[in-house]
Amino acid sequence: MNDNAKNTALASQARARSYGPWPLSGRTRVFCILGRPVGHSMSPAMHNTAFENLGIDAVYVPFEVSDLSRAVRGLVALEIQGASVTIPFKEAVMDLVDEVDETAANIGAVNTLVINKGVIKATNTDWIGARRCLEDLLPIRGHRFVVLGAGGAARAILYAVTRGGGEAVVVNRSEEKGRAVAEAFGVDFSPFSAIERTEADCLINTTPVGMHPHEDKSPVSDTVVRRYEAVVDVIYNPLKTRLLTQAEAAGCRVAGGVEMFVYQGVEQFERWTGQKAPVEQMKEVVYSRLLDP
Ligand code: NAP
Protein backbone atom coordinates (compact mmCIF):
# COMPACT_ATOMS: atom_id res chain seq x y z
CA MET A 1 0.00 0.00 0.00
CA ASN A 2 1.47 3.43 -0.93
CA ASP A 3 1.42 6.43 1.45
CA ASN A 4 -1.70 7.95 -0.08
CA ALA A 5 -3.63 4.71 0.22
CA LYS A 6 -2.40 4.31 3.84
CA ASN A 7 -3.55 7.84 4.72
CA THR A 8 -6.94 7.29 3.12
CA ALA A 9 -7.35 4.03 5.07
CA LEU A 10 -6.33 5.77 8.33
CA ALA A 11 -8.78 8.61 7.68
CA SER A 12 -11.66 6.27 7.08
CA GLN A 13 -10.77 4.21 10.19
CA ALA A 14 -10.67 7.41 12.23
CA ARG A 15 -14.07 8.53 10.89
CA ALA A 16 -15.57 5.14 11.68
CA ARG A 17 -14.12 5.15 15.20
CA SER A 18 -14.95 8.79 15.90
CA TYR A 19 -13.03 10.68 18.59
CA GLY A 20 -16.11 11.72 20.50
CA PRO A 21 -19.69 12.46 19.64
CA TRP A 22 -18.75 15.49 17.53
CA PRO A 23 -16.11 16.39 15.05
CA LEU A 24 -14.41 19.12 17.17
CA SER A 25 -13.11 22.05 15.16
CA GLY A 26 -11.76 25.56 15.63
CA ARG A 27 -15.39 26.75 15.63
CA THR A 28 -16.54 24.41 18.41
CA ARG A 29 -17.77 26.45 21.39
CA VAL A 30 -16.06 25.45 24.63
CA PHE A 31 -17.61 25.27 28.12
CA CYS A 32 -16.01 23.85 31.23
CA ILE A 33 -16.12 23.18 34.94
CA LEU A 34 -13.55 24.66 37.34
CA GLY A 35 -13.08 22.73 40.56
CA ARG A 36 -10.75 20.54 42.58
CA PRO A 37 -11.32 17.62 42.39
CA VAL A 38 -13.54 17.36 39.29
CA GLY A 39 -12.97 13.74 38.27
CA HIS A 40 -16.25 12.65 39.88
CA SER A 41 -18.35 15.46 38.35
CA MET A 42 -21.45 14.48 36.38
CA SER A 43 -21.55 17.88 34.65
CA PRO A 44 -19.45 16.94 31.58
CA ALA A 45 -21.65 13.93 30.77
CA MET A 46 -24.81 15.96 31.38
CA HIS A 47 -23.88 19.01 29.26
CA ASN A 48 -22.20 17.06 26.46
CA THR A 49 -25.30 14.87 26.18
CA ALA A 50 -27.41 18.01 25.88
CA PHE A 51 -25.15 19.52 23.19
CA GLU A 52 -25.17 16.29 21.25
CA ASN A 53 -28.92 15.89 21.59
CA LEU A 54 -29.60 19.34 20.14
CA GLY A 55 -26.82 19.13 17.55
CA ILE A 56 -24.97 22.11 19.03
CA ASP A 57 -21.30 22.38 18.03
CA ALA A 58 -19.99 22.71 21.58
CA VAL A 59 -18.04 20.72 24.11
CA TYR A 60 -17.84 20.79 27.93
CA VAL A 61 -14.57 19.83 29.62
CA PRO A 62 -13.52 19.30 33.26
CA PHE A 63 -10.59 21.40 34.51
CA GLU A 64 -8.94 20.45 37.79
CA VAL A 65 -7.69 23.88 38.82
CA SER A 66 -4.68 24.63 40.99
CA ASP A 67 -4.55 28.41 40.46
CA LEU A 68 -8.06 29.88 40.25
CA SER A 69 -7.04 33.41 39.34
CA ARG A 70 -4.99 32.29 36.34
CA ALA A 71 -7.66 29.79 35.33
CA VAL A 72 -10.31 32.53 35.25
CA ARG A 73 -8.06 34.77 33.12
CA GLY A 74 -7.48 31.78 30.86
CA LEU A 75 -11.22 31.48 30.19
CA VAL A 76 -11.17 34.84 28.40
CA ALA A 77 -7.88 34.15 26.61
CA LEU A 78 -9.24 30.86 25.25
CA GLU A 79 -12.66 32.36 24.40
CA ILE A 80 -14.42 29.83 26.59
CA GLN A 81 -18.07 30.91 26.68
CA GLY A 82 -19.26 29.55 29.99
CA ALA A 83 -18.15 27.66 33.06
CA SER A 84 -19.54 25.85 36.05
CA VAL A 85 -17.75 26.54 39.32
CA THR A 86 -17.64 23.93 42.05
CA ILE A 87 -15.97 23.13 45.37
CA PRO A 88 -13.72 24.75 46.60
CA PHE A 89 -14.04 27.86 44.39
CA LYS A 90 -17.68 28.93 44.66
CA GLU A 91 -16.89 31.86 46.94
CA ALA A 92 -13.34 32.75 45.90
CA VAL A 93 -14.34 33.20 42.25
CA MET A 94 -16.51 36.19 43.16
CA ASP A 95 -13.42 38.42 43.47
CA LEU A 96 -12.06 37.37 40.08
CA VAL A 97 -14.95 38.15 37.71
CA ASP A 98 -16.23 41.37 36.12
CA GLU A 99 -19.79 41.18 37.45
CA VAL A 100 -21.54 39.22 40.19
CA ASP A 101 -25.33 39.35 39.77
CA GLU A 102 -27.69 40.06 42.66
CA THR A 103 -28.69 36.41 43.08
CA ALA A 104 -25.13 35.17 43.52
CA ALA A 105 -24.32 38.12 45.78
CA ASN A 106 -27.34 37.35 47.99
CA ILE A 107 -26.51 33.66 48.15
CA GLY A 108 -22.83 34.42 48.67
CA ALA A 109 -21.69 31.79 46.17
CA VAL A 110 -21.31 31.37 42.41
CA ASN A 111 -21.83 28.19 40.40
CA THR A 112 -22.07 29.63 36.87
CA LEU A 113 -20.01 31.96 34.71
CA VAL A 114 -21.27 33.40 31.44
CA ILE A 115 -18.55 34.93 29.27
CA ASN A 116 -19.38 37.28 26.46
CA LYS A 117 -16.95 39.51 24.54
CA GLY A 118 -14.32 39.08 27.25
CA VAL A 119 -16.68 40.04 30.11
CA ILE A 120 -17.19 37.41 32.82
CA LYS A 121 -20.56 37.50 34.58
CA ALA A 122 -21.18 35.30 37.60
CA THR A 123 -24.49 33.94 38.81
CA ASN A 124 -25.93 31.08 40.84
CA THR A 125 -28.37 28.48 39.50
CA ASP A 126 -28.17 26.05 42.47
CA TRP A 127 -31.15 27.76 44.09
CA ILE A 128 -33.29 27.14 41.00
CA GLY A 129 -32.45 23.43 41.21
CA ALA A 130 -33.30 23.52 44.92
CA ARG A 131 -36.63 25.30 44.34
CA ARG A 132 -37.62 22.77 41.71
CA CYS A 133 -36.69 19.83 43.96
CA LEU A 134 -38.64 21.25 46.95
CA GLU A 135 -41.71 22.28 44.98
CA ASP A 136 -41.97 18.74 43.57
CA LEU A 137 -42.19 17.51 47.17
CA LEU A 138 -44.30 20.14 48.96
CA PRO A 139 -45.17 23.80 48.33
CA ILE A 140 -42.50 26.10 49.76
CA ARG A 141 -45.04 28.76 50.76
CA GLY A 142 -46.60 28.05 54.11
CA HIS A 143 -44.12 25.34 55.14
CA ARG A 144 -41.21 25.32 57.55
CA PHE A 145 -37.87 23.74 56.64
CA VAL A 146 -35.00 22.60 58.85
CA VAL A 147 -31.77 23.08 56.90
CA LEU A 148 -28.88 20.98 58.22
CA GLY A 149 -25.59 22.69 57.35
CA ALA A 150 -24.61 26.26 56.58
CA GLY A 151 -22.36 25.98 53.51
CA GLY A 152 -22.94 26.83 49.85
CA ALA A 153 -25.74 24.31 49.30
CA ALA A 154 -27.52 25.48 52.47
CA ARG A 155 -27.36 29.10 51.33
CA ALA A 156 -28.82 28.26 47.90
CA ILE A 157 -31.66 26.39 49.63
CA LEU A 158 -32.28 29.18 52.12
CA TYR A 159 -32.50 31.61 49.21
CA ALA A 160 -35.06 29.37 47.48
CA VAL A 161 -37.09 28.92 50.69
CA THR A 162 -37.15 32.58 51.74
CA ARG A 163 -37.90 33.82 48.20
CA GLY A 164 -40.64 31.21 47.91
CA GLY A 165 -42.44 32.39 51.06
CA GLY A 166 -41.36 29.51 53.31
CA GLU A 167 -39.87 29.59 56.79
CA ALA A 168 -36.53 28.04 57.71
CA VAL A 169 -34.36 27.14 60.66
CA VAL A 170 -30.64 26.52 60.23
CA VAL A 171 -29.09 23.70 62.24
CA ASN A 172 -25.31 23.59 61.98
CA ARG A 173 -22.36 21.89 63.67
CA SER A 174 -20.42 25.11 64.02
CA GLU A 175 -22.74 27.41 65.93
CA GLU A 176 -21.03 30.64 64.95
CA LYS A 177 -21.25 29.92 61.23
CA GLY A 178 -24.81 28.63 61.54
CA ARG A 179 -25.98 31.76 63.37
CA ALA A 180 -24.28 34.04 60.83
CA VAL A 181 -25.95 32.29 57.89
CA ALA A 182 -29.35 32.26 59.62
CA GLU A 183 -29.02 35.98 60.31
CA ALA A 184 -28.04 36.71 56.70
CA PHE A 185 -31.28 35.10 55.49
CA GLY A 186 -33.45 36.41 58.33
CA VAL A 187 -34.32 32.90 59.59
CA ASP A 188 -33.95 31.04 62.91
CA PHE A 189 -30.95 29.11 64.18
CA SER A 190 -30.94 26.02 66.37
CA PRO A 191 -27.92 24.04 67.60
CA PHE A 192 -27.67 20.34 66.68
CA SER A 193 -28.26 19.45 70.34
CA ALA A 194 -31.78 20.94 70.13
CA ILE A 195 -32.82 19.28 66.88
CA GLU A 196 -35.24 16.91 68.63
CA ARG A 197 -37.25 19.94 69.78
CA THR A 198 -37.18 21.80 66.46
CA GLU A 199 -40.61 21.98 64.78
CA ALA A 200 -40.83 21.88 60.97
CA ASP A 201 -42.49 20.11 58.03
CA CYS A 202 -39.43 19.21 56.02
CA LEU A 203 -35.83 18.28 56.86
CA ILE A 204 -33.12 19.09 54.30
CA ASN A 205 -29.63 17.68 54.68
CA THR A 206 -26.98 19.87 53.04
CA THR A 207 -24.02 18.41 54.95
CA PRO A 208 -21.81 15.81 53.24
CA VAL A 209 -22.67 13.26 55.95
CA GLY A 210 -23.72 10.03 54.19
CA MET A 211 -21.96 10.83 50.93
CA HIS A 212 -19.85 8.17 49.16
CA PRO A 213 -17.67 6.53 50.54
CA HIS A 214 -19.42 7.03 53.93
CA GLU A 215 -22.80 5.60 52.89
CA ASP A 216 -23.39 4.06 56.33
CA LYS A 217 -23.59 7.52 58.02
CA SER A 218 -26.65 9.69 58.62
CA PRO A 219 -26.69 13.19 60.12
CA VAL A 220 -29.69 12.40 62.37
CA SER A 221 -31.36 9.55 64.27
CA ASP A 222 -34.57 7.67 63.33
CA THR A 223 -36.37 9.53 66.12
CA VAL A 224 -35.55 12.87 64.52
CA VAL A 225 -36.52 11.72 61.03
CA ARG A 226 -39.98 10.62 62.24
CA ARG A 227 -40.86 14.23 63.08
CA TYR A 228 -41.02 15.28 59.42
CA GLU A 229 -43.56 14.98 56.64
CA ALA A 230 -40.83 15.23 53.97
CA VAL A 231 -37.05 14.73 53.87
CA VAL A 232 -34.58 15.94 51.25
CA ASP A 233 -30.93 14.96 50.94
CA VAL A 234 -28.92 17.11 48.51
CA ILE A 235 -26.32 14.35 48.23
CA TYR A 236 -26.72 12.45 44.95
CA ASN A 237 -23.97 9.87 45.35
CA PRO A 238 -25.30 7.42 46.51
CA LEU A 239 -28.74 7.94 44.95
CA LYS A 240 -30.38 6.70 48.15
CA THR A 241 -28.52 7.84 51.25
CA ARG A 242 -28.94 6.29 54.68
CA LEU A 243 -31.01 9.37 55.64
CA LEU A 244 -33.45 8.74 52.77
CA THR A 245 -33.73 5.06 53.74
CA GLN A 246 -34.56 6.11 57.32
CA ALA A 247 -37.10 8.62 56.01
CA GLU A 248 -38.83 6.13 53.72
CA ALA A 249 -39.07 3.66 56.61
CA ALA A 250 -40.69 6.42 58.68
CA GLY A 251 -43.27 7.06 55.94
CA CYS A 252 -41.90 10.48 54.89
CA ARG A 253 -41.98 11.76 51.32
CA VAL A 254 -38.38 11.91 50.09
CA ALA A 255 -36.20 13.51 47.43
CA GLY A 256 -32.51 12.99 46.66
CA GLY A 257 -30.03 15.45 45.16
CA VAL A 258 -30.20 14.42 41.50
CA GLU A 259 -33.15 16.64 40.59
CA MET A 260 -31.50 19.65 42.22
CA PHE A 261 -28.28 18.90 40.40
CA VAL A 262 -29.93 18.40 37.01
CA TYR A 263 -32.07 21.54 37.26
CA GLN A 264 -29.13 23.76 38.18
CA GLY A 265 -27.49 22.35 35.03
CA VAL A 266 -30.60 22.88 32.92
CA GLU A 267 -30.62 26.54 33.90
CA GLN A 268 -26.89 26.87 33.11
CA PHE A 269 -27.36 25.24 29.71
CA GLU A 270 -30.23 27.56 28.79
CA ARG A 271 -28.27 30.66 29.81
CA TRP A 272 -25.23 29.56 27.80
CA THR A 273 -27.01 28.46 24.64
CA GLY A 274 -30.32 30.35 24.65
CA GLN A 275 -31.98 27.03 23.82
CA LYS A 276 -34.38 24.87 25.77
CA ALA A 277 -32.43 22.12 27.49
CA PRO A 278 -33.26 18.45 26.80
CA VAL A 279 -34.11 17.77 30.46
CA GLU A 280 -35.05 14.10 30.17
CA GLN A 281 -31.82 13.18 28.35
CA MET A 282 -29.78 15.13 30.92
CA LYS A 283 -31.51 13.31 33.80
CA GLU A 284 -31.13 9.97 32.10
CA VAL A 285 -27.38 10.27 31.64
CA VAL A 286 -26.84 11.38 35.24
CA TYR A 287 -28.91 8.49 36.62
CA SER A 288 -27.18 6.01 34.33
CA ARG A 289 -23.70 7.22 35.40
CA LEU A 290 -24.68 7.05 39.07
CA LEU A 291 -26.15 3.57 38.74
CA ASP A 292 -23.21 2.27 36.68
CA PRO A 293 -20.17 4.48 37.37
P1 NAP B 1 -19.71 23.29 52.34
O1 NAP B 1 -19.84 24.69 51.85
O2 NAP B 1 -18.37 22.75 52.65
O3 NAP B 1 -20.65 23.15 53.65
C1 NAP B 1 -20.76 21.92 54.33
C2 NAP B 1 -21.63 22.10 55.58
O4 NAP B 1 -21.81 20.79 56.14
C3 NAP B 1 -21.03 22.99 56.64
O5 NAP B 1 -22.02 23.77 57.24
C4 NAP B 1 -20.44 21.99 57.65
O6 NAP B 1 -20.55 22.41 59.00
C5 NAP B 1 -21.38 20.81 57.50
N1 NAP B 1 -20.66 19.57 57.81
C6 NAP B 1 -19.58 19.07 57.17
N2 NAP B 1 -19.22 17.91 57.72
C7 NAP B 1 -20.08 17.68 58.74
C8 NAP B 1 -20.22 16.64 59.71
N3 NAP B 1 -19.38 15.60 59.71
N4 NAP B 1 -21.23 16.72 60.60
C9 NAP B 1 -22.07 17.77 60.61
N5 NAP B 1 -21.99 18.79 59.73
C10 NAP B 1 -21.01 18.74 58.80
O7 NAP B 1 -20.33 22.28 51.27
P2 NAP B 1 -21.54 22.53 50.24
O8 NAP B 1 -21.03 23.13 48.98
O9 NAP B 1 -22.66 23.21 50.94
O10 NAP B 1 -21.93 21.01 49.87
C11 NAP B 1 -22.49 20.18 50.86
C12 NAP B 1 -23.06 18.92 50.22
O11 NAP B 1 -24.07 19.26 49.28
C13 NAP B 1 -22.03 18.08 49.44
O12 NAP B 1 -22.32 16.73 49.69
C14 NAP B 1 -22.32 18.42 47.99
O13 NAP B 1 -21.98 17.36 47.10
C15 NAP B 1 -23.83 18.62 48.04
N6 NAP B 1 -24.34 19.51 46.97
C16 NAP B 1 -25.32 19.02 46.15
C17 NAP B 1 -25.84 19.84 45.18
C18 NAP B 1 -26.91 19.31 44.25
O14 NAP B 1 -27.17 19.95 43.24
N7 NAP B 1 -27.56 18.21 44.56
C19 NAP B 1 -25.38 21.16 45.02
C20 NAP B 1 -24.38 21.63 45.89
C21 NAP B 1 -23.87 20.79 46.87
P3 NAP B 1 -19.48 23.39 59.70
O15 NAP B 1 -19.92 24.78 59.35
O16 NAP B 1 -19.60 23.07 61.13
O17 NAP B 1 -18.14 23.03 59.11
Image (spheres, rainbow, N blue to C red):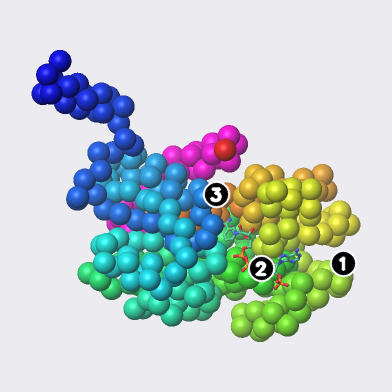
Q: CA distance from mark 2 to mark 1?
A: 22 Å
Badge 3 element: loop
Judged left or right of residue 237, residue 242 is right
Question: In the drawing, does residue 205 fall left or right of residue 73?
Answer: right
Residue at 67% x, 83% y is 180
Q: Nearer the viewer, residue 114 or 37?
A: 37
Whether 288 is among the magenta residues is yes
Figure quadrant of the N terminus:
top left
Q: Decide if ligand 1 comes within 8 Å of the CB at mark 1.
A: no
User: Which badge, 3 or 2, is on the more N-terminal residue?
Assistant: 3
Displayed quadrant of residue 198 = bottom right
For the residue carrying disc 1, how many other residues have a C-alpha within 10 Å: few (<14), some (14-19), or many (20+)?
Answer: few
Residue 91 seen from this side: yes
Which mark is on residue 196? 1
In space, the residues marked 1 and 3 are separated at their CA atoms by 35 Å
Which quarter of the figure has residue 175?
A: bottom right
Task: Give x and y (percent) for residue 122.
Answer: 40, 71
Q: Residue at x 16, y 26 (%)?
A: 7
Residue 45 place in picture, x, y as percent: 44, 44
- Which amino acid lies under the numbered mark 3 shown in the image of this protein? His
Where does the magenta region start and end?
A: 271-292
**Rendered position, 29 above or below 239:** below
Label placed on residue 286: none
Identity of the amino acid at label 2? Gly
Q: Position of residue 289 (x, y in %)?
A: 54, 39
SS for dot 1: helix
Q: Which residue is mark 2?
A: 142
Q: Quadrant of the C terminus?
A: top right
